[in-house]
Image (cartoon, rainbow, N blue to C red):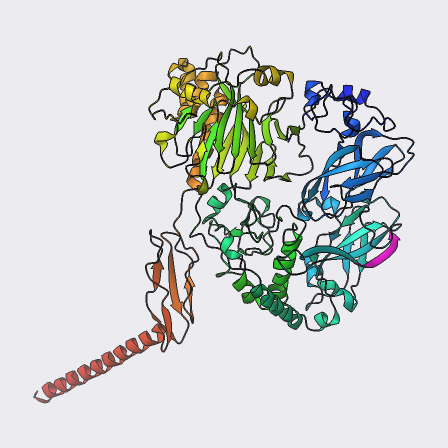
Amino acid sequence: MKPSLLPWALLLLATVPGPGLRPAAGAQGSCSQRCGDQSGPCSCHPTCFGLASCCADVRDFCLEISPYSGSMMGGKDFVVQHLNWPNPTDSVICSFKDSIQTRGHVDASGRVHCVSPLLYESGRIPFSLSMDNGRSFPRSGTWLSVHPSKVSDSEKSQLVNETRWQYYGTPGTQGNLTLTWDTSALPSDTVTIELWGYEETGKPYSQQWTAAWSYLYSLATNIHNSGSFTFTPKPAPQNFQRWEVGSLRIVDSRHRAGEQDVQALWSNEHALAWHLGDDFRMDPVAWARNQCLAWEELEDQLPKFLEELPDCPCTLAQARADSGRFHTDYGCDLEQGSVCTYHPGAVHCVRSVQASPQYDSGQQCCYTADGTQLLTADSTGGSTPDRGHDWGSPPYRVPPRVPGLSHWIYDVISFYHCCLWAPECFRYMNRRPSSDCRSYRPPRLASAFGDPHFVTFDGTNFTFNGRGEYVLLEAALTDLQVQVRTQTRTGSEGSQDRGTGLTAVAIQEANSDVVEVRLGEGAGVLQVLLNQEVLSFAEQSWMDLKGMFLSVATGDRVSVMLTSEAGLEISLQGPFLSVAVLLPEKFLTHTRGLLGTLNDNPADDFTLRSGEVLPPSAGSRELFQFGADWAVQNASSLLTYDSKFLVENFKDRPKHDPTFLPLFPEESSASPSQASAAADLCGDDTFCRFDVAATGSLSVGNASRVAHRQHLLRVQSLQPVVSCGWLAPPANGHKQGDRYLEGSTVRFRCNNGYSLAGAEASTCRADGTWSWPTPTCQPGRSYAVLLGIIFGGLGLVALVGLGYWLLRRRKSNTAVWGSQP
């Protein structure tokens, strides 16, 4: 995503007072303890930069930091921007969430530094800064805590040949192990390398269930910071061997062993095979089998979580299209080369975005190259549900909600015990069976794009090119609001362009954060705002927010995934935005706005606020009034007004511009040459043809054509698919075919020595049932042997018959010869 410059930044830098100036907390002319406040003679709100209304000390108290993100494991050094303290007189203390304090410092250049703490959560973490050794904390900012697997490799130490570390002590895996790191990420002459262990203790699903990282011991102390360390692992002392999941930490040797919240480099969390005891090394299979059996016994005592998980999409196309409920699993990504270590045979996996409501569990769905769902009942590479959602579950911090780590404890290390270190995988798969898709229901899709054109949830197409701010969608079921702003292509009040398009989209559900995606300054620029503050995606493409998740896959596409499992995708299409909205079936009959009433009845899609319904045959001028009726009400606006233009043209004016006269479809016309070019480009796409006529631009028409085509392709991908469910192979036999959707056929065979009783094949029918049940393989001669006997017997009969015939003929000839002279 391209960065955009904030106005007045240089002026503010020139007027910011130094740290020595300390206005009274909450003083109206200062931002001390007032960050986010718009009241008073000057503003401390993020919009003040564009409105030139900031207090002079806004950057001194409302902090910007670099870098702004790091692993939730902590140890990341960051610098407070625009704050210089050349002659510090007291200590710097950084407080996170008002409860976790780390010691900061001032460098030789007078820049103020903080160190991020070890956290058990991901997302935006508020912090405050004290420059008087903790007596007061008038300055504040936000730190982004990131899932350990989503930070860049340069921020971590690397386990060279990580598989070798996690199999160490098993047959054929011995010798040295090597750890490497970027020395510039940890400026120190000498370092200490420590092992930390992670565990979750207490009664599961109780208030006593706790998560904890613990310092165990050091592998090396006071070694040269060379960027590499090689050692031969030795079994850990007995009192440390209960930790089977952990991570290595590299710190400056000046820190005491195990000192928390200091600058550090962590490795990936991993299975600690290399530190386990002699009993593991002497017989790893027996050791792992015992661990697997113990896990199996514990698992059977825990609450059953599978019933509350969503069913998987039936096909890969559905899984990739249902972006409100499922998101790419970074461990098996088609767009990253399909390196699916734990799911051989799969090319792509997705995970449910939201954790389950009661047990915070997660669903996983994996697919083969032909789009077929891969099931554990057919393959160890099948998808497995998770007792602990890999991405965690808000509010995090406690089991099984801790991002990544709860998943390791309840799902991953047990996979090592049962499947990787011992041949007991059937035990694991019996308790982590893949979900099939028999109860999966695709979401409903609606879109808005171009000049602007709308396709409702029930499939109605219409054009409404008013200028203003409108309710795209509202649903009282979850208090969901989606609002849009439309402008002419130039964005200027005096433009004669009679076409408009989407330039901003704002979303909120209940008391969630407000996210807005809008066109930035300059061509091809998207801006994302969180609660009216412009976000940067220079470091991270995924953010955990209040009530939603946010993903920026590329610079021109933003995905918003809400707690209700509704999803939005906002992208750049030509000069305007394109919006796709996905709603699960629970929203049936609960939607209003420009995208219509979701109820499978297109006849009531043009419902006004009053409840009056315009007929489907309504003309373009009537539809213009329908759109105007859904103008945003001033008190409920979610959109941001952070420039003079936006204030004057939208905030302080009617939300629907009554002076703007659009070009209606029946009025659109084009010159012969333009009409010919539009026909070649657009074909039968009426949206494309209209936009060419309205704007005189083939590129605008083509953008609408592409957006419309993407909508139609996604609708096709989300078509319901009938599944008959998994069909078992016969005992003492096998089957051919692992696709269980309508029209698929599964064939059966018996092992040698068994004969098939029942149908040789079964086909999935349109009503979701199999044409035949699984047959049985009964002891006895197999068909091949039986056929051999039959044909052998027939051959013997034929041979006897032939011999008899030849013998009779010979006797007949002898009699004839005997009567000749």
Is 76 left or right of 808, judged from the image as shown? Answer: right
Task: Look at 35% across and 22% down and name the residue there.
Answer: 618
Comparing 204 with 783, the one in front is 204
Quadrant the C terminus occupies = bottom left
Task: Look at 79% across and 22% down and name the residue there.
Answer: 13
> Residue 501: percent from the left, percent from the top?
51, 22
> Residue 359: percent from the left, percent from the top?
57, 54
Q: Tell how many labels.
A: 0
- Boundaries of the magenta span: 216-224
> Residue 538: percent from the left, percent from the top?
68, 34
Which image quarter: residue 38?
Answer: top right
Comparing 522 with 807, the one in front is 522
> Residue 109: percent from the left, percent from the top?
88, 32
Residue 464, visible in the rendered structure: no
Residue 167 sits above or below residue 523 on the image: below
Q: Main secondary structure of the magenta part?
A: strand
Q: Is residue 219 magenta?
A: yes
Residue 157 sits above or below residue 130 on the image: below
Q: Is residue 282 magenta?
A: no
Comparing 382 with 482, the one in front is 482
Comparing 818 with 662, the one in front is 662
Is 180 left or right of 422, judged from the image as shown? Answer: right
Is 605 left or right of 267, judged from the image as shown? Answer: left
Quadrant the N terminus occupies = top right
Residue 787 sits above or below residue 476 on the image: below
Which image quarter: residue 86?
Answer: top right
